[in-house]
Structures are given as C-alpha cells and as structure tokens.
Image: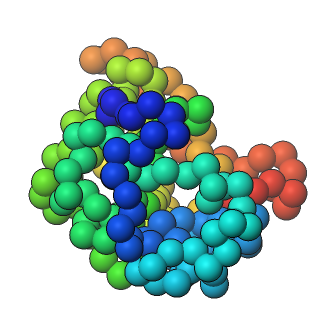
C-alpha cells in the first residue's frame, strides 16, 4: 500500500501537468472522464481556480503525494493519474484514452501489480479506468469489468477460494440508478 504525504501537504507541484482535468470525471461540472474540462487551460491550469468545484479543490494526485512515485509517474509523462481513495478502499488509475495501454508498460505495470498485492492485505483494491471502461487489478490477474453505464457502481464481495478468501469486484446499479451518480 502506498504511503502518502501528510494530508494537504503535497511533495511536488503539478508543474504544468493538467491530465487530471482530462481523464477524470467531474460530477459538479457534469464532465465525463476522457474529455478536457472546459475550464482547463491545457498545460497551464484551471481558468476558474478560485471557484473550482470542491472535488477539484480537494483532489491531489498520487504523483503529488506518494513518495515512491518518481518523475516517471508525473501524469503528463506516464499518461495516467493515480488517485488514492482510502475512504472508498481503493486506488484508482485514470488512464488517458489516447494512450490506453500506458498503464501496462514498465515500470508502471509492475508498480500497479505490487500495489495491488499490498492493497489486498488492507482490504483495498486497485481499479484502472479508461474513460468509462474499467479493470479490477488483482495480484494474479486483471479483470475487464466492461463499460460503466450511468448509475453503475463498483461493489466488492469476499469469495472463498482454495488459497483462502479474496476480494472480487463487480458492477452493480443502486436501487434508484437514475438518481445516483455515475462511477
């Protein structure tokens, strides 16, 4: 499991990287993942920085907060954004749709698999998102969970296996899918 810097204390700066403004969805702005935010000045930053939504205000990508991620993991270099979400028990990898295989390249894939092994010991999971398509990353395999429909969420269950219990992810729709937020 990655160790993070103290809350609110980034180790680095964005330095012109704005990939999170493209690869991540912004519910408050009704912005889908995979398209540039209308308020992003690409390569420079947010044009509404002082009035940006709370989700943007509190977000810090893994490159900014995880000591083990060196310059190779700057999102504008590796083409994905790492997001640690302890409250949701997951680590998310949001990949640029123009570079869908970026997460499978080295040294990234090895780091993702190692992170998956460590996360499982803490009842956390690693999920790779490419737009609305996502994969559950397990220590022994990658499971394509398909494309998320509006309102679908990721759920987890513990499955007994010959080697012991393990967490499995699956898609589920909340009871009132029309009113629920998308993944």
Query: Which sits in the foreground, 23 or 104?
Result: 23
Q: How many numbered marks are there?
A: 0
Residue 146, relative to residue 119: is it above or below? Answer: below
Residue 133, relative to residue 179: is it above or below? Answer: below
Q: Position of residue 149 (x, y in %)?
A: 66, 65
Q: Position of residue 104 (x, y in %)?
A: 22, 60
Residue 44, relative to residue 14: is it above or below? Answer: below
Task: Indicate the quadrant containing the C terminus: top left, top right, bottom left or bottom right.
Answer: bottom right
Q: Position of residue 138 (x, y in %)?
A: 32, 39
Q: Is there any visible trace of residue 141 in the rendered image?
A: no
Task: Indicate the quadrant containing the N terminus: top left, top right, bottom left or bottom right.
Answer: top left
Residue sitting at x 84%, y 46%: 175
Query: Which sits in the foreground, 155 or 3?
Result: 3
Query: Which sits in the foreground, 68 or 112?
Result: 68
Q: Position of residue 62 (x, y in %)?
A: 38, 48
Q: Is residue 76 left or right of residue 85?
A: left
Query: Which sits in the foreground, 171 or 101?
Result: 101
Q: Is residue 40 left or right of residue 129?
A: right
Residue sitting at x 18%, y 60%: 72
Q: Is residue 46 left or right of residue 80?
A: right
For residue 71, what is the image quadrant?
bottom left
Q: Is there any visible trace of residue 21 in the rendered image?
A: yes
For residue 147, what is the image quadrant?
bottom right
Residue sitting at x 45%, y 24%: 123
| Render colour scheme | rainbow
Residue sitting at x 41%, y 45%: 10
């Amino acid at each position: 499991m990655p160790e993070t810097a103290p809350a609110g204390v980034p180790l680095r700066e964005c330095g012109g990287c704005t990939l999170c403004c493209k690869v991540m969805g912004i519910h408050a702005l009704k912005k889908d993942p995979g398209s540039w935010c209308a308020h992003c000045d690409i390569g420079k930053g947010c044009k509404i920085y002082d009035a940006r939504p709370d989700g943007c205000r509190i977000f810090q990508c893994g490159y900014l907060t995880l000591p083990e991620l060196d310059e190779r993991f700057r999102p504008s270099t590796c083409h994905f954004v790492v997001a640690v979400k302890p409250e949701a028990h997951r680590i998310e990898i949001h990949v640029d749709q123009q570079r869908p295989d970026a997460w499978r390249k080295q040294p990234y894939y090895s780091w993702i698999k190692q992170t998956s092994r460590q996360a499982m010991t803490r009842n956390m999971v690693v999920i790779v998102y490419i737009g609305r398509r996502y994969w559950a990353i397990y220590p022994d395999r990658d499971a394509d969970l398909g494309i998320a429909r509006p309102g679908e969420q990721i759920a987890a269950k513990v499955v007994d296996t010959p080697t012991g219990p393990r967490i499995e992810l699956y898609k589920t729709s909340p009871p009132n899918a029309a009113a629920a937020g998308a993944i």
